[in-house]
Amino acid sequence: MTQSPHSRPVMHGSEVTANAQARDAWLAALTELLPRHLFVAGVWLVGSLGRGGDDGYSDVDLVVAVDSTVPAAVLADPATLLRVPDTVLLYTRPKPRNAPAGGAYEAVCIRLAGLPVLVDLYLWPAATAAVPDGARILYARTEPPRSDLAFMTLLDRHRSGDTTGADPDHPATVLLLVQLAAKYQARGDVSRRDGIHQQLHLPTGGTLAVLRDVLDQRIDLARWPAFQPAVAAVHRLLDIVESAHRPDRPTIDPTVERTPSR
């Protein structure tokens, strides 16, 4: 049966399927909870989930439009908005230069169905927020303005003046990059995988075993014991990618167009 370009790729493995289902259920619960905060004016998905081109490995790109009553504590700790009951927060990774002006940005990793899921969380002032091309609105207090620009182009026009990046040697950065490399490997996206390997100062074309070594050698759990659950979850992701991508078990139908954001 021929699939449309926006159909989800054919995935194998019950854990990958369970992860996608858990992600969808988490998003549904979050969509119900966020409007209870009176400062939340709108919520929309961008990236692959917004376009409907996601797969079982896709993460979440989420914009929360907030009005002027948003507490400073929320801007300082955006992950507080994602604490749906029973959600396990593995780590956060701030990167101020990714924030829209007057708002906030944080990469947040949660555990769903035993696997790590990254959430790029943008808190965007409602006064300048617009729904970009390819986004999916989850909630809106009133009809929000729309833009024909892609998300990153729109963000570039409203980006914070803070140029602070993320610490490249912090455990959160290492975990995030290893996750992305594994997911690009799962999708057969060699170019992006090799780009992540370069950020990790690894040779291109490296194996999953090299990524395991990165986790074990660069994250000192004696110093950072709170990262143990995150390291275990990312190792489990590597297990699944390795198992699902044996030569006799192709995991993605090569005839299906893929447009994941990560």
Image (cartoon, rainbow, N blue to C red):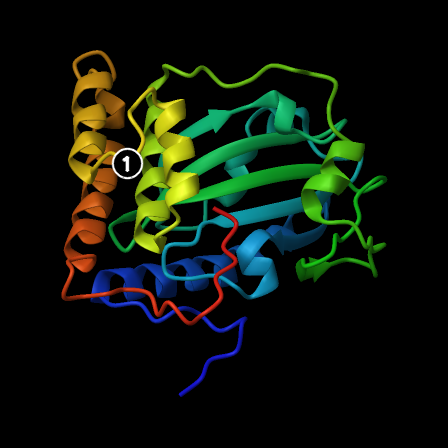
With respect to residue 198, does 168 lie above or below? Answer: above
Total numbered labels placed on residues in the image: 1
Side of 142 relative to 183 (left or right): right
Image location of residue 223, percent across then percent down? 22, 11
Q: In the displayed structure, would residue 215 be above or below residue 48? A: above
Q: In terms of image quadrants, where is residue 88?
A: top left
10, above or below 116, in the image? below
Q: Amino acid at mark 1?
A: Gly
Q: Residue furthest bottom?
A: 1
Which of the pair 41/173 is nearer the observer? 173
Residue for point 85% across, 54% down = 145
Q: Residue at label 1?
A: 205
Determine the secondary structure under disc 1.
loop
221 up-or-down from 15: above or below: above
Residue occupying the far top of the picture: 223
Compared across the picture, whether 103 is left or right of 179 comes to right
Depth order, front residue of 24/200: 200
Rendered residue at 33%/19% (across/down): 201
x then y, percent, for residue 28: 51, 63
Q: Whole-percent x and y of residue 140?
A: 74, 58
Q: 80 or 185: which is nearer to us?
A: 185
* Residue 57, position as x, y percentages in the image: 37, 55
